[in-house]
């Protein structure tokens, strides 16, 4: 199992490596004179003097197409003036001395035979990662361990496994539904004493255009609320419960890292810039074994897991067995799914004003004023109509709730980007981050 990104000089050239999961990527640019590979989209654009094509309103869909897996995602992303960048997930990218680029998908691991095999291999893999991160041979060693928690299955199970490698600090958001989604009691039952809670909206009062880091990835800020913990994340392995669907009885991911039935463009890639700046490595524990997700699903539905199967709408036997085996009482977790983070995906300008940081929204509005002369693609009107059609059930259901009407419409899963004001968030985020990287490069 490999977390973070890396590179190695080999006899065949330089080999660049992505994580073993699909929540981070490498990007590549070939400007005709040199090839640049990076784990940061805005850095790659800054170094090569590239800019996004502001006529395009579907960058979120393009940048988050990693949800379709490496074989189906949009690898080549168009930029201004005919330039392009390439993105890679779950792959190794070899650049040889003749500037030829070859891509190879990461090898699949051996399928799991049962719960004990799955759990032991996962713990062993995490221990190896921790030893590697703390190796004295590293220039920056001494990584600690931190985990997020909630009352749900996913992050709490991540915290349970993190305890196996010495984690003693967990963090939780508070306020709003997070007060109901409080996993503190379960964390105490796991032996945690250092439980840090911070308000879900604290980021809104922060200075420094904090939103930009979470938007320059192309994703609409799903992990922005976790900005309040960056001081605790710094120089640590940070365990998350991201992609907990791998632990569901009906897994909606394939062995090819393709997300089936997943709504919108929530690719969970928005942590990248904040992680790079603060030197932490994200460990989305449920993604362990993603290349053989079907064998994880078989375990969840196996006879041996029936004692930990509740047959409810929110039922994950694997994490329930892990947590109960480690002493967490059955009623202390896994009752209702709330989920962490959020997305600007369906927002309009008015709603953004109440969800972005105060400083960030003012800067974003000013940025849009300066772009008023930008001509969108002739297809933009069609994009708006398609977006409305695809999301109409969601809006009607929202109205039904407000009016206390009994009907609910079913929404078909899709990944189509909002072509409204939200589409400008990517351009703004990249603009801000390019300014920061340009300043940094002048000091090198």
Image: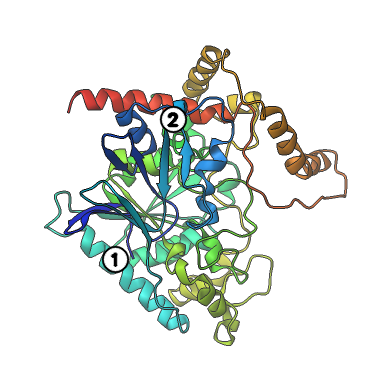
Callout 2: 10 Å neighbours few (<14), some, many (20+)?
many
Asked which secondary structure carries label 1, the reply is loop
Q: Position of residue 70 (x, y in %)?
A: 47, 56
Q: On the image, which quarter does residue 421 sit in?
A: top right
Residue drawn at x 53%, y 29% as measured from the top left: 425
Q: Mark 1 points at which residue?
A: 165
User: Where residue 14 sits in the image (x, y, percent)?
Assistant: 22, 52
Decide which of tag 2 and tag 1 comes sooner along the chain. Answer: 1
Neighbour tally class for label 1: few under 14, some 14-19, many 20 plus, Cα within 10 Å: some
Q: Is mark 2 on a helix, strand or loop?
A: helix
Q: Quadrant of the N terminus?
A: bottom left
> In the visual, does 57 lie left or right of 95?
right
- Residue at horizontal 34%, vertical 26%? 49
Q: Which mark is residue 436?
A: none
Q: Residue at coordinates 39% horizontally, 73% vertically from top-left?
A: 109
Of residues 392 and 314, the one nearer the viewer is 392
x and y, in percent, of residue 269 in the image: 45, 46
Q: Nearer the viewer, mark 2 or mark 1?
A: 2
- Position of 414 with respect to 168 (left or right) is right
Q: Where is residue 117 in the image (x, y as percent from the top left)?
A: 41, 82
Q: Nearer the viewer, residue 170 or 443?
A: 443
Tell me if residue 377 comes above or below residue 84 in the rendering.
above
Q: Residue placed farthest to the front in the image? A: 98
Residue 152 location, quadrant: bottom right
Label drawn at residue 212: 2
Q: Nearer the viewer, residue 360 or 263?
A: 263
Residue 276 in view? yes
Disc 2 to disc 1, how far (Cα)?
33 Å
Which residue is found at the position 27% from the left and 23% from the top?
Answer: 439
Query: Is residue 166 positioned above or below 15 on the image?
Result: below
Question: Left or right: where does residue 160 sit relative to residue 174?
Answer: left
């Amino acid at each position: 199992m490999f977390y973070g990104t890396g590179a190695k000089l080999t006899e065949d050239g330089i080999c660049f490596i992505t994580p073993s999961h699909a929540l981070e990527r490498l990007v590549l640019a070939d400007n005709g004179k040199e090839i640049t590979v990076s784990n940061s989209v805005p850095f790659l654009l800054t170094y090569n003097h590239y800019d996004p094509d502001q006529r395009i309103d579907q960058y979120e869909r393009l940048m988050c197409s990693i949800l379709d897996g490496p074989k189906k995602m949009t690898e080549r992303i168009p930029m201004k003036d005919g330039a392009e960048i390439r993105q890679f997930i779950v792959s190794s990218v070899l650049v040889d001395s003749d500037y030829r680029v070859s891509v190879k998908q990461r090898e699949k691991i051996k399928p799991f035979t049962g719960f004990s095999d799955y759990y032991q291999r996962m713990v062993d893999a995490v221990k190896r990662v921790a030893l590697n991160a703390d190796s004295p041979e590293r220039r920056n060693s001494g990584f600690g361990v931190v985990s997020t928690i909630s009352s749900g299955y996913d992050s709490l199970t991540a915290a349970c496994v993190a305890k196996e490698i010495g984690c003693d600090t967990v963090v939780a958001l508070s306020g709003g539904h997070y007060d109901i989604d409080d996993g503190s009691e379960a964390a105490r039952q796991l032996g945690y004493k250092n439980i840090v809670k911070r308000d879900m909206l604290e980021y809104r009062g922060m200075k420094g255009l904090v939103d930009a880091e979470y938007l320059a990835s192309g994703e609409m800020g799903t992990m922005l609320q976790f900005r309040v913990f960056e001081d605790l994340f710094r120089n640590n392995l940070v365990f998350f419960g991201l992609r907990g669907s791998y632990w569901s009885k009906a897994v909606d991911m394939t062995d090819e890292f393709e997300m089936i039935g997943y709504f919108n463009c929530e690719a969970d890639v928005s942590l990248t810039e904040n992680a790079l700046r603060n030197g932490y490595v994200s460990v989305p524990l449920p993604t362990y074994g993603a290349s053989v997700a079907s064998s994880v699903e078989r375990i969840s539905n196996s006879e041996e897991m029936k004692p930990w199967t509740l047959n409810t709408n929110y039922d994950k036997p694997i994490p329930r067995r892990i947590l109960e085996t480690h002493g967490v009482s059955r009623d202390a977790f896994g009752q209702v799914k709330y989920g962490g983070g959020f997305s600007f995906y369906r927002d309009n300008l008015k709603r953004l004003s109440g969800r972005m940081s105060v400083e960030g929204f003012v800067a974003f509005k000013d940025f849009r004023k300066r772009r008023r002369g930008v001509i969108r693609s002739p297809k933009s009107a069609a994009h708006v109509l398609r977006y409305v059609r695809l999301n109409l059930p969601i809006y009607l259901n929202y109205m039904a709730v407000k009016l206390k009407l009994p009907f609910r419409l079913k929404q078909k899963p899709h990944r189509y980007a909002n072509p409204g004001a939200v589409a400008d968030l990517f351009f703004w985020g990249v603009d801000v981050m390019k300014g920061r990287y340009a300043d940094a490069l002048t000091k090198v």
